[in-house]
Amino acid sequence: MDVVRISKRMSKALRHQPERLGLTLDQAGWVPVEDLLAALHLTRDELDRVVAENNKKRFEVVGGRIRASQGHSVEVDLGYEPAEPPVVLYHGTPTGNVAAILAQGLLKGNRHHVHLSQDTATAEQVGARRGRPVVLTVHAGRMAADGHVFFRSTNGVWLTEHVPAAYVTAPTR
């Protein structure tokens, strides 16, 4: 069983295109586990293994329901309460994106929020998915003091609507 491949299929189904598999997410992004198993032709043991071994802890299972913790491009309300962020958070991105980010800040694109990491190792891993990574520092404490709202997903990813350029610092080399 290819855990990574199945995890990517689950992410697509639970975050971006549930309708392609005949799934309907509820308003908070949940779908019955049995529906997902049938749509992806998985056993419950296979699903449990993917959920347990996903290095990003991307999925939540509660009772007979499953959802993605964050990263949706479809309309959902995950119900996270605002949270006080640490003084700094981090965002990993490929080198080619740095100039645009320093000019316009971090944009959520087609997702609900900008995703931020609490540690540089995670941010570097995220940034390396599409090229040579750069880890940017986000001055989250200052943002929060200035009225920006943050949320923390169940898997520890910090979420915010937008990070203006004034709160982003690139490493000096």
Image (cartoon, helix red, strand yellow):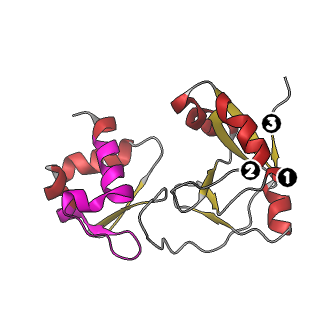
In this view, 67 is above or below 139: below
The Cα atoms of the two marked residues, 3 and 1, are separated by: 11 Å
The Cα atoms of the two marked residues, 3 and 2, are separated by: 11 Å
Q: Nearer the viewer, mark 3 or mark 2?
A: 2
- Picture quarter with the C terminus: top right
Q: Earlier in the sequence, mark 3 or mark 2?
A: 2
| Labels in figure, total | 3
Q: Is residue 109 magenta?
A: no
Crowding near the residue tagged with mark 3, few <14, some 14–19, many ≥20 C-alpha atoms within 10 Å = some
The quadrant where residue 170 appears: top right
Instruction: Tell me which residue sits at (80%, 66%) in the image.
Output: 144
Q: Dots 3 and 1: beta carbons under 8 Å? A: no
Q: Secondary structure at mark 3?
A: loop
The quadrant where residue 123 appears: top right
- Residue annotated with mark 1: 166
Q: Amino acid at mark 2?
A: Gly
Instruction: Tell me which residue sits at (65%, 47%) in the image.
Output: 117
Main SS of the magenta segment? helix
- Residue annotated with mark 3: 170
Q: Secondary structure at mark 2?
A: loop
Q: Amino acid at mark 1?
A: Ala
Q: Which residues are magenta?
A: 6-35
The Cα atoms of the two marked residues, 2 and 1, are separated by: 7 Å
Image spot of residue 67 (x, y percent):
37, 62
In this view, 115 is above or below 151: above
Crowding near the residue tagged with mark 2, few <14, some 14–19, many ≥20 C-alpha atoms within 10 Å = some
- Residue annotated with mark 2: 105
In this view, 75 is above or below 40: below
Q: Dots 2 and 1: beta carbons under 8 Å? A: yes
Image spot of residue 130 (x, y percent):
53, 30
Q: Is residue 20 magenta?
A: yes
Q: Earlier in the sequence, mark 2 or mark 1?
A: 2
